[in-house]
Amino acid sequence: MTVSSADAEVDLAIYDEIEHLKRREDATILAHYYQDGAIQEIADITGDSLKLARAATGVNSKTIVFCGVHFMAETAKILNPEKRVLLPDTLAGCSLADGCPADRLARFQTELRNRGRRFDTVTYINSSADVKAISDWIVTSGNAIEIVRDRVPSDREILFVPDRHLGKYVEEATGRKLILWDGACVVHEVFSVSELLKTRRRLANSITIAHPECPVNIREQADFVGGTEAMLKYVDLIEQPAEILVATEANMLWRLQNNVPRHRYHPVPGVTCACNTCPHMARNTLEKVRDCLRTGGPEIGWRDAFDRAAAVLRRSLLG
Ligand code: SF4
């Protein structure tokens, strides 16, 4: 299969132009693993949410171009108030972040407190700054288990938002009972177990890896469950070339193929098709990366909620 979306026809001059603009604007390009391969190729740093959030704090340039979705660029700004953070397309949202508006979360927290519940709110990084600001902890798929197991006091209940599938996974892994917000990722929720089983029948001795944002029926079929950074480490440990079925956003296959090319990677099919791409990530294009460097916008501006969100992010991810 072709895993490189960079194979698509691209005007090569745009790469030179982006390089030139990057130097002119003193910019560093960060790209999430769910971005098109062509964008990952021009990035200075690629990673999952945790790696990129940490990397953003070590960037020396004046400008960060964040190729990802809105909450990620916001996080980079929150951790780097003095830097200019550009997002190629401000409409690049996230179904998880959109499914948990801060006012609804605040109402639910109040209801719980009025019922005498004592809890910490543990929030997946896929959320707005306003939601982060009313949370106690921010987690990524890479550190959620560790934070829930080791850092949230054992005498507190846990309200986990916004991803019920990741929450369920953390609940199973830590043995702590969580109050789960009813949110899900539009990409990870649509994998089909029956299609997965059919593909496995065709590919003898294949290995299945799944992201913890997948529902439990997909996770149960997986040989390995982990975030994208953990997936890269896992496949690198498999010495013999293997057929690997991947249940996460389709552009991750490009990164896997690039980093560990001895294996063959196959997307786990969805219920309607095999193209499990995130429509929000797909809004960013090379042209929009070039244009935001040309014009200096769209830029993530500072908002009041960022101050409180910064404290929660720092103690959760950088502490
Ligand atoms: S893949 Fe899912 S969780 Fe990730 S940005 Fe897209 S909608 Fe959000």
Image (cartoon, rainbow, N blue to C red):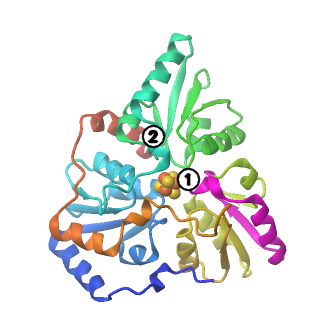
Does the residue tagged 1 have its C-beta within 8 Å of any atom of ligand 1?
Answer: yes
The quadrant holding residue 291 is bottom left
The amino acid pointed to by label 2 is Ser
Q: Are marks 2 and 1 in contact (CB under 8 Å)?
A: no
Front position in the image: 93 or 302: 93
Left-right relation of 168 to 258: right
Q: Nearer the viewer, mark 2 or mark 1?
A: 1
Residue 192 seen in the figure: yes
Front position in the image: 33 or 260: 33
The quadrant holding residue 160 is top right
Left-right relation of 313 to 22: right
Left-right relation of 127 to 65: right
Which segment did they paint magenta? 187-213
Instruction: Look at mark 2 in the image and give the residue it sits on.
Output: 316
* Residue 60 drawn above or below residue 96: below
* Element assignment for label 1: loop
* Residue 147 drawn above or below residue 68: above
Q: Please state, as top left, top right, bottom left or bottom right, where the C terminus lies in the image.
A: top left
Across and down, in percent, residue 133 comes to 37, 33
The amino acid pointed to by label 1 is Val
Real-space Cα separation, disc 2 to disc 1, in angstroms:
26 Å
- Whether the magenta-drawn stretch holds residue 118 is answered as no
- Label 2 vs 1, first from the N-terminus: 1
Across and down, in percent, residue 179 comes to 61, 29
Across and down, in percent, residue 285 comes to 35, 71
Instruction: Look at mark 1 in the image and give the residue it sits on.
Output: 186
